[in-house]
Image (tube, grey):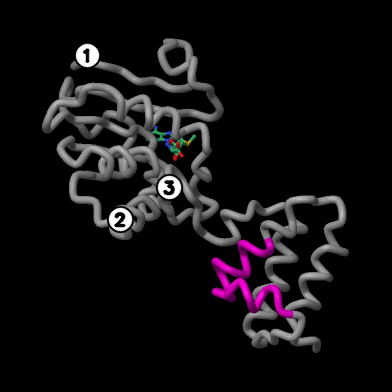
Amino acid sequence: MDKKLSHYIERIKDSFARNTDINKEFIFFLKEKLKIADLDILSKNFEISNYQIDLIHKFIDDKKKGIPIDYILESSFFNGRKFIVDNQVLIPRPETKLLVDYINNLYLKKNAKILDAGSGSGCIGISLALDNPKILVYANDISFQSCEISKANKIMHEVKNYYLINSNWLSCYQENIFDLIVKKNGLHDIKTIKDNNSNFRVTFGKK
Ligand SMILES: C[S@@+](CC[C@H](N)C(=O)[O-])C[C@H]1O[C@@H](n2cnc3c(N)ncnc32)[C@H](O)[C@@H]1O
């Protein structure tokens, strides 16, 4: 078995000739998952362990199945922070940052209560809680597995003002307690944030 990393870098290029992103993703994988230093990645003679070779084989199999790199790495970068993800949650979408920016630019009074409804990985609510330490962010998701992931992210980021519950939408809360409710479904763009028919629902006031 060839133990030289350069052998696998060449092999990836040949196996995925049509995927122009593969080199970038593989280098990211080597750094993030296998913790290999830049200079070692560049070296023609750097050798890797059997365990690392097994992980590279798994990377190749997963990519052939079309699994996104974030699920392979079990992490995703959103709004400048790393979030744990698995295939039970949506990979945080870059455009969701626009929603977080939009809310960060609102006047949010001290102790304002915001609900992140359908929190998934927790990327929206945790970002808001970290960016606005004086507000209170509530989050819920009907999926227990999603809640486990957002709980892991809450712990990883040591968020104090983020309160997560496994529930069906608003069923577990008293009526009219939130100053703002954020609900995101699927794809969207910034213009739709203010549009009632949008995939973003940002509901203001205690309605
Ligand atoms: C499109 S994902 C969005 C996840 C996350 N907000 C994000 O932007 O990455 C929608 C989330 O809503 C959750 N969900 C669906 N139905 C729900 C319900 N009835 N009550 C609470 N959460 C629900 C799903 O489990 C899923 O995590």
Q: Which residue is mark 3?
A: 80
Question: What's the amino acid at mark 2?
Answer: His
Label located before the other in sequence (1 or 3): 3
Residue drawn at point x = 40 percent, y = 54 percent? 149
Predominant secondary structure in magenta?
A: helix
Question: What's the amino acid at mark 1?
Answer: Lys
Segment colored magenta: 26-43
Residue 158 image label? none
Whether 112 is drawn above or below 176: the answer is below
> Rounded to the nearest whole Å, what is the CA distance between mark 1 and mark 3?
33 Å
Respond yes or no on whether mark 2 lies under 8 Å from ligand 1. no
**Was residue 31 drawn as part of the magenta stretch in this picture?**
yes
Quadrant of the snapshot with the N terminus: bottom right
Instruction: Give coordinates of residue 87: x percent, y percent.
Output: 54, 52
Residue 207 image label? 1
**Was residue 193 drawn as part of the magenta stretch in this picture?**
no
- Nearer the observer, 185 or 126: 126
Q: Residue furthest left?
A: 110
Instruction: Give coordinates of residue 29: x percent, y percent.
Output: 62, 65
Instruction: Give coordinates of residue 88: x percent, y percent.
Output: 50, 50
